[in-house]
Image (cartoon, rainbow, N blue to C red):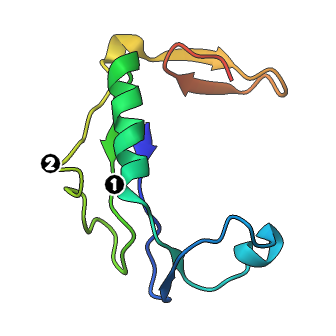
Amino acid sequence: MIVGGESGTNPEYFWNPKADWRKELNTPGRRTMWVGWAAKLRNLCSEAGVPFWFKQITSGHQGRGSDALGRQYRELPPPHMLKWAETAEHGDLISVLGVRY
């Protein structure tokens, strides 16, 4: 699983889950990432044996705060876990971790 906050040069703001999501999608800027959310996903991945890659926290530049969880997480699946599977809708091939989407 790849996890990371939004980057960009516009102002950072807190997402309001009670607001109209259509307006929220058109708000300029980058939404503040809750680091606890990333930590929870890291823990769930660890429990499930799923590789976890943490890119960054919300920042004006890519890669900033990649150690916000106490260290850098750059886990990759072993090559034998990768399989090719057809998508149900189009028959296109996609690489997945033994999971059909």
Query: Is 80 located above or below residue 60 in the figure?
Result: above
Q: Which mark is residue 55?
A: 1
At x 36%, y 75%, the residue is 59
Q: Which mark is residue 99?
A: none
Q: Is residue 49 visible?
A: no
Query: Is 58 located above or below residue 37 in the figure?
Result: below
Q: Quadrant of the C terminus?
A: top right
Q: Earlier in the sequence, mark 1 or mark 2?
A: 1
Q: Position of residue 76 (x, y in %)?
A: 30, 30
- The residue under label 2 is 71
Query: Is 97 located above or below residue 1 in the figure?
Result: above
Q: Position of residue 31 (x, y in %)?
A: 53, 72
Please state which of the two labelled residues, at mark 1 or mark 2, is closer to the viewer.
Answer: 2
In the displayed image of the protein, which residue is found farthest to the front? 18
* Amino acid at the residue labelled 1: Lys
* Amino acid at the residue labelled 2: Arg
At x 23%, y 50%, the residue is 69
Q: Position of residue 23 (x, y in %)?
A: 79, 78
Q: Is residue 58 left or right of residue 23?
A: left
Image quadrant in which you'd find residue 90: top right
Nearer to us in this view, 48 or 52: 48
